[in-house]
């Protein structure tokens, strides 16, 4: 299956840097993986213009569960689709921590994304304390079964495994640990209503992925791409990750 490399810019960038980064990537030769850029919401329209007719796709970092209405400051999946997004990240651990998002809320957002015709990238991941207590498998199973829409299939949904302790810390999970968690995610997915095609589900790894470690991570069994934070802000490092896809 074609791997997916997603750049999560988080709350970083300016109109000038976003334009330079998106146009710089659009000017690179065609990649053998799918690539999606997820800038902050005010830069989405600028980035969609900069990527032009290249194969790069646009993604948002969050959406609301409702289609429209009195939700000041929120953004609907329908509008994201209309302005050119193909993907939306939901349930990132920073949103779960900063905004108290629960699995049920993440599921509602991912359901809205699917309904709007977007591919949700649903994030799951254990904290360091949970890993130390040996709870990784149970936490991930609970998050996967609680956060994925009933309508999720391998074709319309992406899962990202991001151990919270590996995000922005320079620490990455070992490839052996990543393989185990990705295997478990696929097993849990199989038990869901749309889980019959689990073998084709794209499961991304995220957490301090960079040019220098991407090859080993992307070659790991059960890894189908990466969700990249910090390194996605650097054109050449992000390109090294894209080129490292098998
Ligand atoms: P990082 O972030 O690559 O900076 O660790 C990954 C993410 O949070 O998506």
Image (cartoon, rainbow, N blue to C red):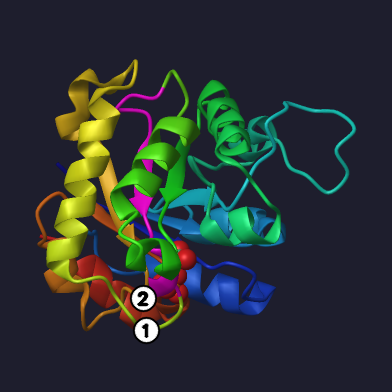
Q: Nearer the viewer, residue 76 or 31?
A: 76
Q: Which residue is tagged 2?
A: 208
What residue range appears in magenta?
Answer: 152-167
Query: For residue 165: magenta?
Result: yes
Q: Quadrant of residue 243?
A: bottom left
Q: Quadrant of residue 197?
A: top left
Horizontal side of 219 relative to 22 (left or right) equals: left
Q: How far apart, in angstroms, are the residues tagged by discs 2 and 1?
A: 5 Å
Q: Quadrant where the N terminus lies?
A: top left
Q: Earlier in the sequence, mark 2 or mark 1?
A: 1
Q: Residue 52: x percent and y percent?
A: 48, 54
Q: Which residue is tagged 1?
A: 170
Label pair 2/1, CB-CB below 8 angstroms: yes
Ligand 1 visible in quadrant:
bottom left
Q: Secondary structure at mark 2?
A: loop
Horizontal side of 197 relative to 59 (left or right) equals: left
Q: Residue at x 64, y 70 (%)?
A: 11
The label on residue 102 is none
Q: Is residue 118 visible?
A: yes
Q: Secondary structure at mark 1?
A: loop
Q: Residue 240: x percent and y percent?
A: 24, 76
Query: For residue 111: magenta?
Result: no
Q: Quadrant where the C terminus lies?
A: bottom left
Q: Residue 123: x percent and y percent?
A: 44, 49
Crowd around label 1: few <14 · some 14–19 · many ≥20 (10 Å): few
Q: Residue 2: x percent and y percent?
A: 18, 46
Mark 2 C-beta to ligand 1 under 8 Å: yes
């Amino acid at each position: 299956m074609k791997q997916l490399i997603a750049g999560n810019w988080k709350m970083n960038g300016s109109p000038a840097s976003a334009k330079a980064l998106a146009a710089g990537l659009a000017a690179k030769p065609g990649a053998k993986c799918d690539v999606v850029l997820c800038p902050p919401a005010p830069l989405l329209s600028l980035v969609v213009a900069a990527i032009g007719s290249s194969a790069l796709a646009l993604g948002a970092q969050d959406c609301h569960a409702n289609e429209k209405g009195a939700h000041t400051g929120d953004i609907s999946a329908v509008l994201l689709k209309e302005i050119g997004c193909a993907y939306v990240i939901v349930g990132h651990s920073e949103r779960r921590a900063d905004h108290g998002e629960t699995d049920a809320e993440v599921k509602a957002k991912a359901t809205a994304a699917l309904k709007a015709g977007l591919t949700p990238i649903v994030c799951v991941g254990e904290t360091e304390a949970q890993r130390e207590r040996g709870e990784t498998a149970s936490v991930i199973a609970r998050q996967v079964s609680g956060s994925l829409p009933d309508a999720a299939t391998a074709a319309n949904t992406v899962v990202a495994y991001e151990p919270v302790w590996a995000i922005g810390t320079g620490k990455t999970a070992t490839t052996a640990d990543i393989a185990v968690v990705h295997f478990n995610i696929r097993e849990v997915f199989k038990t869901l209503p749309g889980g019959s095609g689990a073998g084709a589900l794209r499961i991304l790894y995220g957490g301090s992925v960079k040019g220098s470690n991407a090859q080993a991570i992307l070659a790991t069994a059960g890894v189908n791409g990466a969700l990249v934070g910090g390194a996605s802000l650097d054109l050449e490092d992000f390109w090294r990750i894209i080129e490292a896809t098998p």
